[in-house]
Image (cartoon, rainbow, N blue to C red):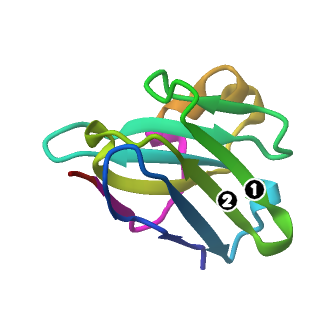
């Protein structure tokens, strides 16, 4: 049984940093691409970032603008999302998800589509407020 568990969320002030973690069991992350998505109240789920199987391909949503960094630790089967210069509009529930489908489709843009990810965590809340 595949399980993804996010952690690291919290309440921070604007300009602060957080590092989110996504730990997997029942799935070796090196055999999947991993993405981060977020969802604010009354809004659609939004693509944040993804890292490919090997880690050689990394993509970010346009709103990131250099503030976030995704990385993976294969030894610990964990993917991280370092978030710096946080803004109030970053407030959302953040999810990690595993993509185990076609690598060709992934690299052609499927990484952007939450429906293409097969496994999801329960989310970790990030609140940015003064």
Residue beneath the point at 52% across and 24% down: 65
Which quadrant, please, contains the N terminus?
A: bottom right
Residue 63 locus on image (x, y percent): 43, 25
Residue beneath the point at 60% across and 74% down: 2
Query: Which portion, as a residue range, is magenta?
Result: 114-127
Tag 1's secondary structure? strand
Q: Which residue is mark 1?
A: 72
Badge 2 vs badge 1, beta-carbon distance below 8 Å: yes
Q: Quadrant of residue 9?
A: bottom left
Q: CA distance from mark 2 to mark 1?
A: 4 Å
Tag 2's secondary structure? strand
Residue beneath the point at 67% across and 59% down: 79
Residue 16 locus on image (x, y percent): 43, 51
Q: Which mark is residue 79?
A: 2
Asked if residue 56 is positioned above or below residue 62 in the image, the reply reads below
How many numbered circles does the render carry? 2
């Amino acid at each position: 049984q595949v399980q993804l568990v996010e952690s690291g969320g919290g309440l921070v002030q604007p300009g602060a940093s957080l590092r989110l973690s996504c730990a997997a069991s029942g799935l070796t992350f090196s055999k999947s691409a991993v993405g981060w998505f977020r969802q604010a109240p009354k809004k659609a789920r939004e693509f944040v970032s993804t890292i490919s199987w090997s880690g050689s391909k990394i993509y970010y949503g346009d709103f990131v603008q250099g503030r976030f960094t995704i990385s993976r630790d294969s030894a610990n089967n964990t993917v991280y999302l370092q978030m710096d210069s946080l803004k109030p509009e970053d407030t959302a529930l953040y999810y990690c998800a595993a993509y185990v489908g076609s690598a060709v489709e992934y690299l052609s843009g499927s990484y952007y589509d939450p429906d293409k990810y097969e496994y999801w965590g329960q989310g970790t809340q990030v609140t940015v407020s003064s």
